[in-house]
Image: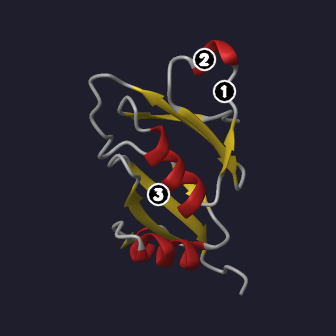
Amino acid sequence: MIHHVQLACPRGSEDRSRAYYVDLLGLAEKPKPPALAARGGCWFTGHGAELHLGVEDDFRPARKAHPALLRPDLDALAARLAAAGYPVIWGDEELPGLRRFHTEDAHGNRLEFLAPATEPT
């Protein structure tokens, strides 16, 4: 079982991270332990996942590698992201039994969101 996934972010981008991960994705910010808080970045949790955004001074967004996160509200999430100007690229036909789309976070990191194709309404 995975405890968390870490993505990189540029130094000083915590407010952008919070706006994306809390306001758009609906995750909760998890306080970092004091020994790690001085390094910058943010931690988020919700929907069965924990994501850590860690500062990388020579930041480059992950364009191929990505976490794939299950979400029960796939269509509503896609609509929120698209309305906020983020790409939503559907790939339902590629994985039988799953609906999914790719997008990017506020820093350009690739993210995938999935739900069972028989998602309850």
The foreground one among 49 and 65 is 49
Q: Could you tell me the amino acid type at mark 2?
A: Leu
Q: Nearer the viewer, mark 3 or mark 2?
A: 2
Numbered disc 3: secondary structure: strand
71 is higher (above) or lower (below) than 75: above
**How far apart are the two marked residues, 3 and 2, measured between alpha carbons?**
27 Å
Q: Position of residue 24 (x, y in %)?
A: 54, 63
* Upstream in sequence: badge 3 or badge 2: 2
Residue pointed to by mark 3: 112
Q: Is 108 on the left-hand or right-hand side of 41?
A: left
Is the Cβ of the residue at disc 2 closer than 8 Å to that at disc 1?
yes
Is the Cβ of the residue at disc 3 closer than 8 Å to that at disc 1?
no
58 is higher (above) or lower (below) than 92: above
Residue pointed to by mark 1: 32
For the point 66% across and 35% down, which residue is it? 2
Residue pointed to by mark 2: 36
